[in-house]
Image: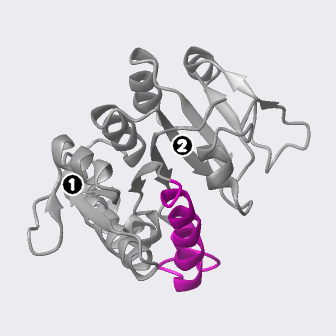
Amino acid sequence: MARYSRILLKLSGEVLAGQNTLGIDPEKVNSLAAEVAEVSRTGIQLALVIGGGNFFRGVAAAAKHMDRVVADQMGMLATVINALAFADALERKGVPTRVLTAVEMNRVAEFYTARAAIAHLEAGRVVICAGGTGNPYFSTDTGASLRALEIKADAVAKATRVDGVYDKDPLKHSDARMFERISHQDVLDKGLAVMDTSAVVMCRDNQLPIRVFNLNTGGNIMRMAMGEPVGSVIG
């Protein structure tokens, strides 16, 4: 598998919390930023979408009694916080970065457009897409698939806590079997909890591959970006 030219990397918000339950672990953010910076210096264009679970999980109980639209808007703002933290870590490593958000907040970040994102990528900047899609009822998984298609990425890279796509949860079942390659349709038919259904459907309908790999294995972001056989390929 050839090295990619442009990748959309999807990270969960929880990963930024490190060993903590909530919030941001500076050491974890710094180590992840170092890996992303290393990939960026190879000339591979990187865009990121980071979830907001490390903040929003803290208000999840209260959100159960909120209007869904309000709760989703809070989640969007959480992704902006994470994007700013990650951008700061990258900039401190000398990597030019731009945060583009689907929620207008001009004093904090640029407003997202696909044209702006592509221009920044072609100028050698890492682009962090925040604010989800700017609409409620859409997950950051779906936002990642949408942004990947808009910027014409070669693949969506989904970072997880396990080595790839399994037929059942490997953290609960010792006999779980990993797929090195599986089609989008098989993921949907088998009900595999890799990404939200709408995110997988979007990738399927536009022939966009999804790479699923273990973020906890050091160097895997680079291996994935260089096209090495790590994790699973959906497509």
Colour pattern of the rendering: one colour
Describe the element under mark 1 as helix, strand or loop.
loop
Q: In this picture, which residue range is highlighted in magenta?
A: 15-42
User: Is residue 20 depicted above or below 202 in this figure?
Assistant: below
Mark 2 Cα within 10 Å, few/some/many (few <14, many 20+)? many
User: Is residue 64 depicted above or below 152 in this figure?
Assistant: below
Q: Nearer the viewer, residue 116 or 209?
A: 116
Query: The N terminus appears in which quarter of the rendering?
Result: top right
Describe residue 182's horizontal placement relative to residue 79 as left or right.
right
Residue drawn 25% across and 57% down? 131
**Looking at numbered disc 2 in the image, what kind of residue is underneath it?**
Ala
Q: In which quarter of the image is residue 199?
A: top left
Mark 1 Cα within 10 Å, few/some/many (few <14, many 20+)? few
Describe residue 17's horizontal placement relative to residue 143 as left or right.
right
Q: Which mark is residue 67?
A: 1
Q: Residue 221 carries which label?
A: none
Query: The C terminus appears in which quarter of the rendering?
Result: top right
Q: Does the magenta stretch include residue 27?
A: yes
Visible residue check, residue 21? no
